[in-house]
Image: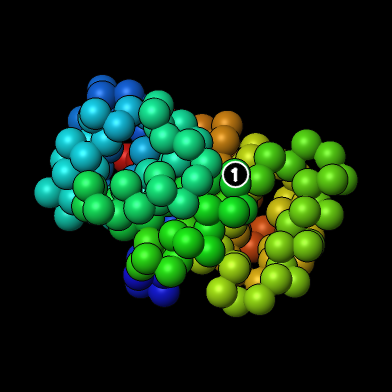
């Protein structure tokens, strides 16, 4: 699934990130091909994923934001067995390897707040292929183009810029700086 996921994202570089039911309903009407699910719990996640899949879109579950899931392999097993999700998003590197082993696409999310984040991105890029995520997502996505270029050159996997992207100019800066895609909760961007 990993390679297929990356190809879809690179072909349609605007990803809808949804944080509630109204955002979900709106993104289903948009032309985006992939959806990052940033809300829900273990009782509702399968239904949320099904709505996205029924609309013909890729569904990626943010493991850290689903109430009732823990940062353990059993949680990725739960997503694989009880939902139709295509993959996971997480800040927890330990979930990536197992998720890939069971056929889920993976996005490892970094908050780029200081030089430690850059060190962690560099370390991750030196790991073997089996432990590499399919893509990384950096937040906030509106960081200066110079920093996006630096991160893209360090990473062995494609980069998504997410967070605070609200205008066409934000999208264009991220993509022109080397990002493969952007993710945003802004419905204005979904319908560009």
Dot 1, how many residues are within 10 Å of its Cα: few (below 14), some (14-19), or many (20+)?
A: some
For the N terminus, the quadrant is bottom left
Quadrant of res 112: top right
Residue 166 showing in the rendered view: yes
Residue 58 relative to residue 179: left or right: left
Residue 77 relative to residue 160: left or right: left
Residue drawn at point x = 16 percent, y = 41 percent: 51
The x, y position of residue 124, in whole percent, is 71, 62
Residue 5 showing in the rendered view: no
The x, y position of residue 132, in whole percent, is 60, 67
Return the residue at label 1: 91
Residue drawn at point x = 41 percent, y = 48 percent: 74
Whether residue 144 is situated above or below residue 38 in the rendered picture: below
Q: Nearer the viewer, residue 46 or 17?
A: 46
Whether residue 5 is situated above or below residue 74 in the rendered picture: below
Residue drawn at point x = 57 percent, y = 32 percent: 164
Q: Nearer the viewer, residue 79 or 32?
A: 79
The x, y position of residue 180, in whole percent, is 54, 62
Q: Residue furthest left?
A: 54
């Amino acid at each position: 699934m990993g390679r297929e996921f990356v190809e879809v994202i690179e072909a349609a570089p605007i990803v809808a990130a949804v944080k509630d039911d109204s955002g979900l309903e709106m993104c289903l009407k948009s032309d985006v091909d992939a959806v990052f699910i940033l809300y829900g719990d273990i009782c509702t996640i399968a239904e949320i994923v099904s709505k996205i899949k029924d609309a013909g879109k890729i569904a990626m579950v943010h493991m850290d934001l689903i109430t009732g899931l823990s940062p353990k392999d059993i949680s990725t097993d739960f997503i694989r067995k009880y939902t139709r999700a295509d993959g996971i998003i997480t800040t927890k590197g330990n979930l990536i390897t197992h998720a890939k082993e069971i056929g889920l696409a993976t996005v490892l999310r970094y908050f780029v707040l200081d030089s430690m984040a850059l060190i962690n991105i560099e370390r991750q890029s030196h790991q073997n292929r089996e432990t590499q995520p399919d893509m990384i997502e950096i937040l906030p996505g509106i960081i200066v183009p110079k920093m996006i270029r630096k991160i893209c050159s360090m990473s062995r996997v494609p980069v998504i810029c997410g967070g605070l992207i609200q205008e066409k100019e934000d999208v264009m800066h991220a993509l022109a700086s080397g990002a493969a895609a952007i993710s945003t909760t802004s419905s204005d961007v979904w319908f560009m």
